[in-house]
Image: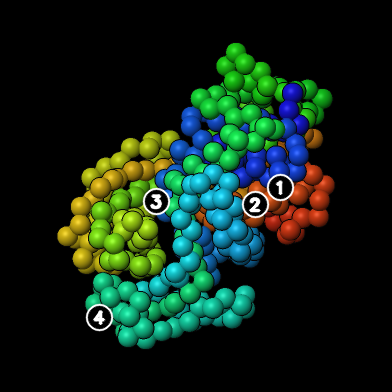
Amino acid sequence: MSDFLVVGGGVIGMMTTLQLADAGHEVTLLERGACGRESSWAGGGIVSPLYPWRYSAPISRLSTWSEGYYPELALRLLEETGIDPEYRQKGLLYLRVDDEARALGWARAVGKPLERVAADFLYAKEPAAVPGCDGALWMPTLGSIRNPRLVKALRERLLAMPKVRLMEGCEVTGLSHAAGRITAVNAGAERFTAGEVVVCGGAWAAELLGSLGVGLPVRPVKGQMILFRAPPGLVQRVVLMDGRYVIPRGDGRVLAGSTLEEAGFDKGTDRAARESLWESATRIVPALAECEVEHHWAGLRPGSPDGTPFIGRVPGLDNLSVNAGHYRNGLVLAPASTRLLVDQLLGREAILDPSPYRLEGRLSATA
Protein backbone atom coordinates (compact mmCIF):
# COMPACT_ATOMS: atom_id res chain seq x y z
CA MET A 1 0.00 0.00 0.00
CA SER A 2 1.42 3.35 -1.07
CA ASP A 3 0.89 6.70 0.57
CA PHE A 4 -0.41 8.03 -2.75
CA LEU A 5 -1.68 6.43 -5.91
CA VAL A 6 -1.67 8.58 -9.07
CA VAL A 7 -3.81 7.55 -12.04
CA GLY A 8 -2.46 8.85 -15.34
CA GLY A 9 1.15 9.15 -16.46
CA GLY A 10 1.07 12.34 -18.52
CA VAL A 11 2.96 15.45 -17.55
CA ILE A 12 0.39 16.23 -14.81
CA GLY A 13 0.60 12.77 -13.30
CA MET A 14 4.38 12.56 -13.50
CA MET A 15 4.94 16.01 -11.99
CA THR A 16 2.49 15.15 -9.19
CA THR A 17 4.39 11.93 -8.50
CA LEU A 18 7.73 13.72 -8.55
CA GLN A 19 6.65 16.33 -6.03
CA LEU A 20 5.10 13.77 -3.68
CA ALA A 21 8.21 11.59 -3.85
CA ASP A 22 10.43 14.64 -3.31
CA ALA A 23 8.48 15.19 -0.07
CA GLY A 24 9.39 11.67 1.07
CA HIS A 25 6.19 9.78 0.24
CA GLU A 26 5.77 6.40 -1.42
CA VAL A 27 3.87 6.83 -4.67
CA THR A 28 2.43 4.37 -7.19
CA LEU A 29 1.78 5.75 -10.67
CA LEU A 30 -0.58 3.82 -12.96
CA GLU A 31 -0.59 4.55 -16.70
CA ARG A 32 -2.80 2.80 -19.27
CA GLY A 33 -0.11 2.98 -21.96
CA ALA A 34 3.40 4.41 -21.80
CA CYS A 35 4.06 7.45 -19.63
CA GLY A 36 3.95 10.74 -21.46
CA ARG A 37 2.71 9.34 -24.77
CA GLU A 38 -0.70 11.03 -24.98
CA SER A 39 -1.40 14.78 -25.12
CA SER A 40 1.73 15.59 -23.10
CA TRP A 41 3.82 14.21 -25.98
CA ALA A 42 1.63 15.54 -28.77
CA GLY A 43 1.54 19.25 -27.89
CA GLY A 44 3.74 22.07 -29.07
CA GLY A 45 5.55 23.00 -25.88
CA ILE A 46 4.89 26.75 -25.76
CA VAL A 47 5.17 27.71 -22.09
CA SER A 48 2.27 30.17 -22.22
CA PRO A 49 -1.33 30.21 -23.37
CA LEU A 50 -1.31 31.17 -27.05
CA TYR A 51 -2.99 34.54 -26.51
CA PRO A 52 -2.75 34.93 -22.72
CA TRP A 53 -4.78 38.15 -22.54
CA ARG A 54 -7.84 36.21 -23.73
CA TYR A 55 -7.82 33.89 -20.72
CA SER A 56 -9.35 34.23 -17.28
CA ALA A 57 -7.43 35.37 -14.22
CA PRO A 58 -7.31 31.86 -12.68
CA ILE A 59 -5.58 30.49 -15.78
CA SER A 60 -3.22 33.47 -15.93
CA ARG A 61 -2.17 32.96 -12.32
CA LEU A 62 -1.29 29.31 -12.93
CA SER A 63 0.49 30.19 -16.16
CA THR A 64 2.61 32.93 -14.62
CA TRP A 65 3.79 30.66 -11.78
CA SER A 66 4.60 27.83 -14.20
CA GLU A 67 6.53 30.05 -16.61
CA GLY A 68 8.83 31.06 -13.79
CA TYR A 69 9.40 27.45 -12.75
CA TYR A 70 10.22 25.82 -16.09
CA PRO A 71 13.86 26.99 -16.39
CA GLU A 72 14.63 25.49 -12.97
CA LEU A 73 12.82 22.25 -13.78
CA ALA A 74 14.60 21.83 -17.12
CA LEU A 75 18.01 22.32 -15.50
CA ARG A 76 17.16 19.88 -12.72
CA LEU A 77 16.06 17.16 -15.13
CA LEU A 78 19.14 17.62 -17.30
CA GLU A 79 21.39 17.29 -14.25
CA GLU A 80 19.57 14.26 -12.82
CA THR A 81 18.86 12.31 -16.02
CA GLY A 82 21.23 13.58 -18.70
CA ILE A 83 18.18 14.29 -20.90
CA ASP A 84 17.86 17.89 -22.03
CA PRO A 85 14.20 19.03 -22.22
CA GLU A 86 15.47 21.81 -24.50
CA TYR A 87 13.91 24.75 -22.71
CA ARG A 88 14.42 27.80 -24.97
CA GLN A 89 13.61 31.34 -23.92
CA LYS A 90 13.89 33.29 -27.17
CA GLY A 91 10.60 35.14 -27.06
CA LEU A 92 7.47 35.09 -29.18
CA LEU A 93 6.28 37.25 -32.08
CA TYR A 94 2.55 37.82 -32.62
CA LEU A 95 1.60 38.78 -36.19
CA ARG A 96 -1.73 40.32 -37.23
CA VAL A 97 -3.31 40.57 -33.78
CA ASP A 98 -6.77 42.16 -34.02
CA ASP A 99 -7.06 43.02 -30.33
CA GLU A 100 -3.71 44.71 -29.75
CA ALA A 101 -5.10 47.32 -27.37
CA ARG A 102 -6.51 44.60 -25.14
CA ALA A 103 -3.22 42.70 -25.26
CA LEU A 104 -1.14 45.73 -24.30
CA GLY A 105 -3.58 46.67 -21.53
CA TRP A 106 -3.36 43.16 -20.12
CA ALA A 107 0.44 43.29 -20.22
CA ARG A 108 0.51 46.55 -18.28
CA ALA A 109 -1.92 45.16 -15.69
CA VAL A 110 0.06 41.98 -15.03
CA GLY A 111 3.57 43.38 -15.58
CA LYS A 112 4.42 41.39 -18.72
CA PRO A 113 7.00 42.81 -21.16
CA LEU A 114 4.74 42.80 -24.22
CA GLU A 115 5.26 45.61 -26.71
CA ARG A 116 4.44 46.74 -30.22
CA VAL A 117 7.54 46.59 -32.45
CA ALA A 118 8.16 47.93 -35.95
CA ALA A 119 8.76 45.93 -39.10
CA ASP A 120 12.55 46.36 -38.98
CA PHE A 121 12.62 44.80 -35.50
CA LEU A 122 10.38 41.92 -36.63
CA TYR A 123 12.50 41.03 -39.64
CA ALA A 124 15.74 41.41 -37.72
CA LYS A 125 14.43 38.75 -35.33
CA GLU A 126 12.80 36.52 -37.97
CA PRO A 127 14.04 37.30 -41.50
CA ALA A 128 12.01 34.43 -42.98
CA ALA A 129 8.66 35.61 -41.56
CA VAL A 130 5.89 36.47 -44.00
CA PRO A 131 6.81 39.66 -45.90
CA GLY A 132 4.76 42.83 -45.72
CA CYS A 133 3.98 43.05 -42.00
CA ASP A 134 4.12 46.59 -40.62
CA GLY A 135 5.14 45.31 -37.20
CA ALA A 136 4.26 42.78 -34.52
CA LEU A 137 3.70 42.26 -30.82
CA TRP A 138 6.82 41.01 -29.07
CA MET A 139 7.03 39.10 -25.78
CA PRO A 140 10.75 38.58 -25.08
CA THR A 141 10.41 36.41 -21.97
CA LEU A 142 8.31 33.61 -23.41
CA GLY A 143 9.88 30.17 -23.56
CA SER A 144 9.20 26.81 -25.13
CA ILE A 145 10.17 23.28 -24.23
CA ARG A 146 10.50 20.12 -26.31
CA ASN A 147 7.76 18.16 -24.62
CA PRO A 148 8.71 14.66 -25.87
CA ARG A 149 12.07 15.18 -24.21
CA LEU A 150 10.47 16.68 -21.10
CA VAL A 151 8.24 13.65 -20.53
CA LYS A 152 11.14 11.29 -21.27
CA ALA A 153 13.24 13.06 -18.64
CA LEU A 154 10.41 13.01 -16.09
CA ARG A 155 9.91 9.28 -16.66
CA GLU A 156 13.62 8.55 -16.26
CA ARG A 157 13.75 10.55 -13.05
CA LEU A 158 10.78 8.70 -11.58
CA LEU A 159 12.25 5.31 -12.50
CA ALA A 160 15.35 6.20 -10.50
CA MET A 161 13.44 7.20 -7.34
CA PRO A 162 13.21 4.39 -4.77
CA LYS A 163 9.89 5.58 -3.36
CA VAL A 164 8.17 5.53 -6.78
CA ARG A 165 6.50 2.50 -8.31
CA LEU A 166 5.77 3.18 -11.97
CA MET A 167 3.27 0.80 -13.57
CA GLU A 168 2.83 1.18 -17.35
CA GLY A 169 0.39 -0.79 -19.48
CA CYS A 170 -1.89 -0.77 -16.45
CA GLU A 171 -5.35 0.51 -17.37
CA VAL A 172 -7.55 1.48 -14.45
CA THR A 173 -11.01 -0.02 -14.94
CA GLY A 174 -12.75 1.22 -11.82
CA LEU A 175 -12.59 2.58 -8.31
CA SER A 176 -14.02 0.71 -5.34
CA HIS A 177 -15.42 2.84 -2.55
CA ALA A 178 -17.17 2.52 0.80
CA ALA A 179 -18.10 4.94 3.56
CA GLY A 180 -16.99 7.98 1.58
CA ARG A 181 -13.52 6.65 0.76
CA ILE A 182 -11.79 4.95 -2.16
CA THR A 183 -10.90 1.49 -0.93
CA ALA A 184 -9.16 0.17 -4.06
CA VAL A 185 -8.13 1.14 -7.57
CA ASN A 186 -8.90 -1.71 -9.95
CA ALA A 187 -6.87 -2.47 -13.06
CA GLY A 188 -8.33 -5.63 -14.52
CA ALA A 189 -7.65 -8.41 -12.02
CA GLU A 190 -5.21 -6.26 -10.03
CA ARG A 191 -6.21 -4.13 -7.06
CA PHE A 192 -4.11 -1.28 -5.72
CA THR A 193 -4.58 0.54 -2.44
CA ALA A 194 -3.27 3.84 -1.13
CA GLY A 195 -4.04 6.39 1.52
CA GLU A 196 -4.82 9.00 -1.14
CA VAL A 197 -5.80 8.61 -4.81
CA VAL A 198 -5.20 11.32 -7.39
CA VAL A 199 -6.81 11.13 -10.85
CA CYS A 200 -4.69 12.84 -13.52
CA GLY A 201 -6.22 11.00 -16.45
CA GLY A 202 -6.48 13.87 -18.92
CA ALA A 203 -9.19 13.32 -21.51
CA TRP A 204 -10.08 9.99 -19.84
CA ALA A 205 -10.61 11.44 -16.34
CA ALA A 206 -14.34 11.97 -16.81
CA GLU A 207 -14.93 8.34 -17.76
CA LEU A 208 -13.21 7.11 -14.62
CA LEU A 209 -15.01 9.51 -12.29
CA GLY A 210 -18.29 8.82 -14.04
CA SER A 211 -18.16 5.28 -12.66
CA LEU A 212 -18.54 6.88 -9.23
CA GLY A 213 -21.47 9.04 -10.30
CA VAL A 214 -19.25 12.15 -10.49
CA GLY A 215 -20.01 14.28 -13.55
CA LEU A 216 -16.65 15.84 -14.41
CA PRO A 217 -17.23 17.98 -17.55
CA VAL A 218 -14.00 17.03 -19.31
CA ARG A 219 -14.06 15.80 -22.91
CA PRO A 220 -11.46 14.86 -25.54
CA VAL A 221 -10.66 17.58 -28.11
CA LYS A 222 -8.40 16.41 -30.91
CA GLY A 223 -5.47 18.46 -32.13
CA GLN A 224 -3.34 17.64 -35.17
CA MET A 225 0.18 18.94 -35.82
CA ILE A 226 2.94 18.59 -38.42
CA LEU A 227 6.72 18.75 -38.25
CA PHE A 228 8.96 20.22 -40.97
CA ARG A 229 12.56 19.15 -41.48
CA ALA A 230 13.95 22.66 -41.88
CA PRO A 231 17.54 23.90 -41.99
CA PRO A 232 18.88 25.11 -38.64
CA GLY A 233 18.25 28.80 -38.14
CA LEU A 234 15.35 29.19 -40.55
CA VAL A 235 13.05 29.92 -37.59
CA GLN A 236 14.57 31.11 -34.31
CA ARG A 237 11.56 31.69 -32.06
CA VAL A 238 7.85 31.01 -31.75
CA VAL A 239 5.71 32.95 -34.24
CA LEU A 240 1.90 33.13 -34.04
CA MET A 241 -0.46 34.37 -36.73
CA ASP A 242 -4.22 33.95 -37.17
CA GLY A 243 -4.46 31.41 -34.35
CA ARG A 244 -1.77 29.08 -35.74
CA TYR A 245 1.90 28.91 -34.80
CA VAL A 246 5.35 27.65 -35.71
CA ILE A 247 7.81 26.49 -33.05
CA PRO A 248 11.50 25.91 -33.75
CA ARG A 249 13.45 23.06 -32.23
CA GLY A 250 17.13 23.09 -31.43
CA ASP A 251 18.01 20.89 -34.42
CA GLY A 252 16.23 23.18 -36.91
CA ARG A 253 13.00 21.26 -37.18
CA VAL A 254 9.85 23.39 -37.07
CA LEU A 255 6.59 22.23 -35.54
CA ALA A 256 3.32 23.74 -36.81
CA GLY A 257 -0.07 23.55 -35.16
CA SER A 258 -2.76 23.03 -34.44
CA THR A 259 -6.32 21.96 -35.16
CA LEU A 260 -9.28 21.90 -32.76
CA GLU A 261 -11.67 19.02 -33.44
CA GLU A 262 -14.58 17.52 -31.55
CA ALA A 263 -14.06 13.90 -32.57
CA GLY A 264 -14.46 11.91 -29.37
CA PHE A 265 -11.54 9.60 -28.67
CA ASP A 266 -10.52 9.33 -32.32
CA LYS A 267 -6.80 10.11 -32.68
CA GLY A 268 -6.59 9.57 -36.43
CA THR A 269 -4.95 12.07 -38.77
CA ASP A 270 -6.35 13.20 -42.12
CA ARG A 271 -5.23 14.90 -45.29
CA ALA A 272 -7.48 17.94 -44.90
CA ALA A 273 -5.93 18.81 -41.53
CA ARG A 274 -2.42 18.25 -42.88
CA GLU A 275 -3.07 20.58 -45.80
CA SER A 276 -4.61 23.21 -43.55
CA LEU A 277 -1.62 23.10 -41.17
CA TRP A 278 0.82 23.24 -44.11
CA GLU A 279 -0.95 26.27 -45.56
CA SER A 280 -0.94 28.08 -42.20
CA ALA A 281 2.73 27.33 -41.57
CA THR A 282 3.85 28.41 -45.02
CA ARG A 283 1.90 31.66 -44.68
CA ILE A 284 3.79 32.40 -41.48
CA VAL A 285 7.18 31.34 -42.91
CA PRO A 286 6.97 30.98 -46.71
CA ALA A 287 10.33 29.17 -46.94
CA LEU A 288 8.79 26.19 -45.14
CA ALA A 289 7.11 25.35 -48.46
CA GLU A 290 10.52 24.06 -49.60
CA CYS A 291 10.92 21.80 -46.55
CA GLU A 292 9.84 18.21 -46.13
CA VAL A 293 6.94 17.43 -43.79
CA GLU A 294 8.57 14.77 -41.67
CA HIS A 295 5.75 13.82 -39.33
CA HIS A 296 2.00 14.34 -38.81
CA TRP A 297 0.22 13.30 -35.62
CA ALA A 298 -2.75 13.93 -33.35
CA GLY A 299 -3.41 14.07 -29.62
CA LEU A 300 -6.43 14.44 -27.36
CA ARG A 301 -6.63 17.50 -25.15
CA PRO A 302 -8.73 17.31 -21.94
CA GLY A 303 -11.30 19.97 -22.81
CA SER A 304 -13.24 21.74 -20.06
CA PRO A 305 -16.05 24.32 -20.22
CA ASP A 306 -13.87 27.44 -19.93
CA GLY A 307 -10.36 25.98 -19.91
CA THR A 308 -10.00 26.26 -16.13
CA PRO A 309 -8.73 22.94 -14.75
CA PHE A 310 -10.40 20.98 -11.97
CA ILE A 311 -7.94 20.76 -9.08
CA GLY A 312 -8.84 19.43 -5.67
CA ARG A 313 -10.84 16.97 -3.60
CA VAL A 314 -13.80 15.17 -5.17
CA PRO A 315 -16.91 16.06 -3.13
CA GLY A 316 -18.13 13.19 -0.99
CA LEU A 317 -14.91 11.16 -1.20
CA ASP A 318 -12.38 12.23 1.38
CA ASN A 319 -9.32 10.51 -0.13
CA LEU A 320 -9.92 11.14 -3.85
CA SER A 321 -8.58 14.20 -5.69
CA VAL A 322 -8.45 15.19 -9.33
CA ASN A 323 -6.21 17.34 -11.51
CA ALA A 324 -7.64 17.44 -15.03
CA GLY A 325 -9.34 19.63 -17.63
CA HIS A 326 -6.42 21.86 -18.66
CA TYR A 327 -7.64 21.90 -22.29
CA ARG A 328 -4.93 23.50 -24.51
CA ASN A 329 -2.68 24.40 -21.58
CA GLY A 330 -1.78 21.16 -19.85
CA LEU A 331 1.96 21.54 -20.29
CA VAL A 332 1.73 25.30 -19.69
CA LEU A 333 -0.05 24.95 -16.36
CA ALA A 334 1.43 21.65 -15.16
CA PRO A 335 4.03 22.92 -12.66
CA ALA A 336 1.61 25.27 -10.91
CA SER A 337 -1.45 23.03 -11.00
CA THR A 338 0.44 20.04 -9.61
CA ARG A 339 2.14 22.14 -6.94
CA LEU A 340 -1.23 23.61 -5.95
CA LEU A 341 -2.76 20.17 -5.47
CA VAL A 342 0.29 18.73 -3.70
CA ASP A 343 0.27 21.68 -1.31
CA GLN A 344 -3.31 20.80 -0.39
CA LEU A 345 -2.61 17.07 -0.12
CA LEU A 346 0.32 17.67 2.23
CA GLY A 347 -1.36 20.40 4.28
CA ARG A 348 1.07 23.10 3.17
CA GLU A 349 0.30 26.73 2.45
CA ALA A 350 -0.90 26.83 -1.15
CA ILE A 351 1.04 28.81 -3.77
CA LEU A 352 -2.26 30.28 -5.03
CA ASP A 353 -5.83 30.62 -3.86
CA PRO A 354 -7.27 27.16 -4.67
CA SER A 355 -10.93 28.19 -4.73
CA PRO A 356 -11.31 28.92 -8.50
CA TYR A 357 -10.19 25.38 -9.34
CA ARG A 358 -12.21 23.37 -6.82
CA LEU A 359 -14.80 20.88 -8.05
CA GLU A 360 -17.64 22.11 -5.84
CA GLY A 361 -20.25 23.85 -7.96
CA ARG A 362 -18.52 22.99 -11.23
CA LEU A 363 -19.58 19.38 -11.78
CA SER A 364 -22.17 18.19 -14.30
CA ALA A 365 -25.38 16.39 -13.45
CA THR A 366 -25.09 12.62 -13.64
CA ALA A 367 -27.62 10.00 -14.55
Residue 132 - label: 4
Residue 109 is situated, as x and y percent measured from the top left of the image, at 62, 78
For marks 4 and 1, the one nearer the N-term is: 4
Image-based side of 313 in relation to 172, left or right: right
In terms of secondary structure, where does tag 1 sit?
A: helix
Q: Foreground: 326 or 231?
A: 231
**Mark sitting earlier along the chain (1/3):** 3
For numbered disc 4, what is the local secondary structure?
A: loop
Marks 2 and 1, how far apart in space? 6 Å
Amino acid type, mark 1:
Leu
Q: In the image, which disc is placed on residue 260?
A: 3
Asked if residue 79 can be seen in this view, the reply is: yes
Tell me whether the residue at label 4 lies in contact with that at label 2, contact meaning CB atoms closer than 8 angstroms.
no
Q: Are marks 2 and 1 in contact (CB under 8 Å)?
A: yes
Numbered disc in front, either 3 or 4? 4
Q: Earlier in the sequence, mark 2 or mark 3?
A: 3
Give the alpha-carbon distance from disc 4 to disc 2, as whole Å. 40 Å
Decide: is 220 above or below 278: above
Q: CA distance from mark 1 to mark 3?
A: 28 Å
Which element type, helix, strand or loop, lies under badge 3? loop
Residue linked to disc 1: 341
Instruction: Indicate which disc residue 337 carries.
Output: 2
Disc 3 residue type? Leu
Q: Residue at x 56, y 50 (%)?
A: 79
As drawn, the residue found furthest toward the top would be 189
